[in-house]
Image (cartoon, helix red, strand yellow):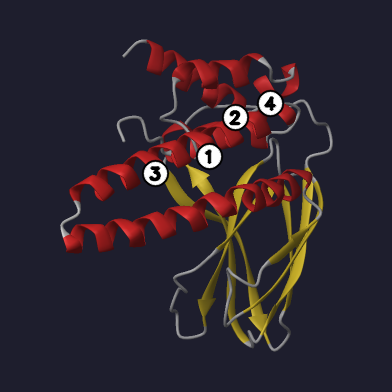
Amino acid sequence: MKYLFSLATISFLILSCSNSDTKMTLSGQVKGLKKGTLLLQKIEDTLLVSVDSVLVNGDSSFEFSEEITCPEMYYLYVRLKDGTLKDDRVSFFAEPGEINIKTTLKNFQVDARITGSKNEAALDEYKKLVRRYTSKNLDYIQENFEALKSGNDSLVAAITKQQKSLIASKYFTAVNFALNHNDYELAPYLMLSEVSDANVKYLDTVYSNLTPKIKDSKYGKALESFIVKRKNE
């Protein structure tokens, strides 16, 4: 898709938030991790960089203290004792306050349970809403594969039409969710990460309805810049 957007491209923006309490205390446990290093990372200047690390040696509990000037996505990685970096990672919406992550080494990303972040809680709610679209799309992919094998061109065309309708429904769900959460940093983030190739008028509608605080956030300003870019193309 022409307008797929990478959040990494907007990380160069120098942004600030008005929240005076900027400290995040991130604690948790990785069940099964005996020795290794936990890496706290985020995107800076288009690169994923480590901002802190904690050595684990026998105790699978961990704690980080990080200044969060503006809520944004952070990532938790594990480097095993032999230096191997696990392929999966835990992404979470970092924000000031106490956040807790409990997971397992075996299923590091899938088993992650994150509490304490209001943006993360809203993101979980959104994921539940769109899960049905993902499931239905997998059904369409399988049906399309079978139709192609049998050479049924008319069925392939019908399935393709249904898939396009499904995508449109998913986009409207994202837009409506963002409009209903216009005082969350998650709202502009969803527009950039989930539906950046949607009609620009929908992106503009969401941005126009953001609260002043969210418009001034990292993702709020990034969305504003992205909309200007889209309109000039």
The reply to whether residue 132 is in sight is yes
Tag 3 residue: 163
Question: In the rendered view of the protein, which quadrant contains the C terminus?
Answer: top left
* Residue at the limit of the structure toward the left, as seen here: 151
- The residue pinned by badge 4 equals 179
Asked if disc 3 and disc 2 are in contact, CB closer than 8 Å, the reply is no
Residue 196: give x, y in percent of width and height.
45, 31
Answer whether labels 4 and 2 touch (C-beta < 8 Å): yes
Under circle 3, the secondary element is helix
Residues at discs 2 and 1 in contact (Cβ within 8 Å)? no
Which residue is identified by label 2? 175
Q: How many marks?
A: 4
| Secondary structure found at label 4 | helix
Q: Amino acid at mark 4?
A: Leu
Residue placed most toward the observer, 101 or 17? 101
Query: What is the C-alpha distance between the residues marked 2 and 1?
Result: 9 Å
The mark nearer the N terminus, 3 or 2, is 3
Q: The residue under label 3 is which amino acid type?
A: Gln
Contact? badges 3 and 4 (CB < 8 Å):
no
Kindly report which numbered mark, 4 or 1, lies closer to the viewer in this rendering.
1
* Marks 3 and 1 in Cβ contact (< 8 Å): no
What distance separates the C-alpha of mark 3 from that of mark 1?
A: 11 Å
